[in-house]
Image (cartoon, rainbow, N blue to C red):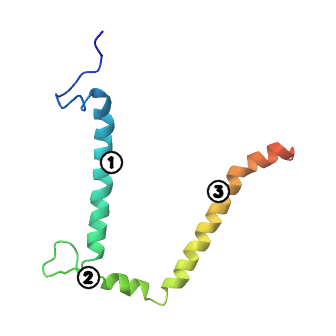
Amino acid sequence: MESRIVKLSTLGGKITTQNVIPVGCILIISYLVLIPLGMLLIGSIRSAPIGEQGAHFTFKNYLKADLSPRFFPLLGYSFIYGFGRGRVSLGADASPIFFQRTGKG
């Protein structure tokens, strides 16, 4: 009995209808993620906006941000916020288990 999988090419049966859709989805999602991410990265290491003449690649923007006196307090606030949000989400997830096991509430 012949297989119901339709071969789209003669590349050793590697391209079939079963793997065209997942591979296509992976390619589309990769394109939609990597192109904007690449543009952000390139824009962050250029001295001028993309498309402007005379711009060069530099890490001066990163040094300016990381050596700013406001950097470490803001980094600390970010960790405090992240830790607090993590505690809230874990508390919300674990509370039904706690109340079910203890019979309270």
Label 3 – label 2 distance at C-alpha: 40 Å
Which residue lies at the image location 27% right of the left edge and 51% below the top edge?
31
Report the residue marked by disc 2: 58
Q: Position of residue 52 (x, y in %)?
A: 16, 76
Which residue lies at the image location 37% right of the left edge and 87% below the top edge?
64
How many residues crowd around disc 3 within 10 Å: few (fewer than 14), some, or many (20 or more)? few
Q: Residue furthest front?
A: 12
**Quadrant housing residue 39:** bottom left
Report the residue marked by disc 3: 89
Q: Position of residue 36 (x, y in %)?
A: 29, 60
Q: Secondary structure at mark 1?
A: helix
How many residues crowd around disc 2 within 10 Å: few (fewer than 14), some, or many (20 or more)? few
Report the residue marked by disc 1: 29
Q: Nearer the viewer, residue 88 or 20?
A: 20
Which residue lies at the image location 28% right of the left edge and 77% below the top edge?
45
Q: Residue furthest right?
A: 103
Label 1 – label 2 distance at C-alpha: 30 Å
Mark 3 or 2, closer to the camera: 2
Q: Nearer the viewer, residue 99 or 59?
A: 59
Q: Secondary structure at mark 3?
A: helix
Residues at marks 3 and 2 touching, judged by CB atoms closer than 8 Å = no
Q: Which mark is residue 99?
A: none
Which quadrant, please, contains the N terminus? top left
Look at the picture and state if 8 lies above or below 103: above
